[in-house]
Amino acid sequence: MAMSPKLEFRQSQSLVMTPQLMQAIKLLQFSNLELTAYVEAELERNPLLERASEEGMPESAERAEAGDSAGESGADKSGGESPDTGEWMASDMEPSRADMESRMDADLANVFPDDVPSGQMAPGGGAAGGSASSSYTEWSGGERGEDYNPEAFLAAETTLADHLEAQLSVAETDQTRRLIGLYLIGLIDETGYLTADLDKVAEQLSVSRAEVDDVLALIQTFEPSGVGARSLSECLALQLREKDRYDPAMQALVENLELLARHDRNALRRVCGVDAADIADMIQEIRRLDPKPGLVIGSGVVHPLVPDVYVRPGRDGTWLVELNSETLPRVLVNQSYHATVAKASLSAEEKSFLSECLQSASWLTRSLDQRARTILKVASEIVRQQDGFLLHGVRHLRPLNLRMVADAIGMHESTVSRVTSNKYISTPRGVVEMKFFFSSAISASGGGEAHSAEAVRHRIRTLIENESAEDVLSDDTLVQKLKADGIDIARRTVAKYRESMNIPSSVQRRREKLSQRNA
């Protein structure tokens, strides 16, 4: 068979990931710290980008107005007179959206759909005023002060909170208990002590005090030894227990530190029931312990999680959802500087560089705006879906997945996934990660509304915590009690959830309870 050359034309569609599209996707999934570091790098690289002040005017324009030559810069003045109109971001000199899309071979609408806010959410799940869509509050980027240091975010030093959260993610698989743990870690100061009122913590999270105590006991087993203590005595006791040196005599010494502070060794000998040599050895052992264990991890102050979105109840019973402006670096395009440079005699290479800088700056400002709107829209839908959690606590979490949110707001699942990555919401129940609100569904008996898997886990743990040594609940009994509560669940699912929460079997629990009672 003879071989001959042949020319064919084929038409096909494919998605081309331009650098601008990749940048927009990266911006969407960045945390607030990563976003700040990225924008700071762009400000250093692109001469047409300016950090906006609180009045919406670039810092260079403010400096020009403050100097003697302010009257000579008519372009700067005209740009700063109406900061709310966005003249710095969109002027006659800036390329139009269609022009940008043509040059970059990219469609901005494919990255983030335009969102039109309307209505206001009601806690009941609907929208106030008859509108079916959720609303958001007007937002603006926060001003970074002169003391702002981007190197603080680029440093690789691990903080105490990071160290504890990493251990918590390994030691605890239950999402509810992990939420409690993250909340407690946020309350631990840089020295490693927890000074919060645990009753108030339990009330705010709508969980039992026993659950909070149990999670705190887990945190107190983490490194560094002694972390999570509520007093110096407890801190020393935790370290002594780890060394297996917390005998009755040492316990008496730790409980009477005021005598040690007064150097009253005679009283200490009587309290501890030991002789002078033993009390001297015990004191030396106490002195080798660390009274501030948190300081060994990092040297900076431990900060709690910074939320990206705030949720608070409104006066009319709705939920108000707004962005945290402090996490939104605001940048503008300095059209005046571009116009001045463009008038100069430039080479072809310089003109190309200037055009690239203008396009990149315009794209970044638009991407940051769309990023904020997209985060707010996703957060608003999550709040609408999970209003039961905000009102009544963890037990009232509803089944929710990415597709449900994506379909409700007209976005793709991948967009919702990126939005919820590394983002946190400040709610009346504490600061929680957006992904916490997503949970699989457990069918309801009688055809009722399905239950969240996290709510079912919480119910299983509550039932087991309230059992007695004489009435330890087997997995079959748990199934019956859950079905009585309207939760249709299989025995193997109960066993899987129990094992994921590191809860032993009913036989092991009965042995442990009997041994503790007989001890």
Image (cartoon, rainbow, N blue to C red):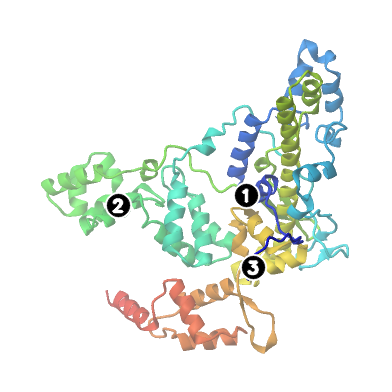
> Which residue corresponds to the image point at 19% horizontal and 43% vertical from the top-left?
284
Disc 1 versus disc 3: distance between alpha carbons? 70 Å
139 or 255, nearer to the observer: 139
Where disc 2 sits, the SS reads: helix
Residue 361 against residue 232 in the figure, above or below: above
- Circle 3 packing at 10 Å, graded few (<14), some (14-19), many (20+), is few
Q: What amino acid is labelled 3 in the image? A: Ala
Residue 132's quadrant in the figure? bottom right
- Circle 1 packing at 10 Å, graded few (<14), some (14-19), many (20+), is many
Query: Which residue in the structure is indicated by mark 2?
Result: 239
Residue 387's quadrant in the figure? bottom right
**Percent x, y of residue 59:** 72, 25
Where disc 1 sits, the SS reads: loop
- Residue 307's tag is 1
Q: Nearer the viewer, mark 3 or mark 2?
A: 3
Q: Nearer the viewer, mark 1 or mark 3?
A: 3
393 or 40, nearer to the observer: 40
Q: What amino acid is labelled 1 in the image? A: Pro
Disc 2 versus disc 1: distance between alpha carbons? 34 Å
Query: Which residue in the structure is indicated by mark 3?
Result: 2
Q: How many marks?
A: 3
> Which residue corresponds to the image point at 76% horizontal and 38% vertical from the top-left?
362
Q: What amino acid is labelled 2 in the image? A: Gln
67 or 456, nearer to the observer: 67
Q: Nearer the viewer, mark 2 or mark 1?
A: 1
Where disc 3 sits, the SS reads: loop
Is tag 1's residue or tag 3's residue first in the polypeptide sequence? 3
Q: Which quadrant: the N terminus? A: bottom right
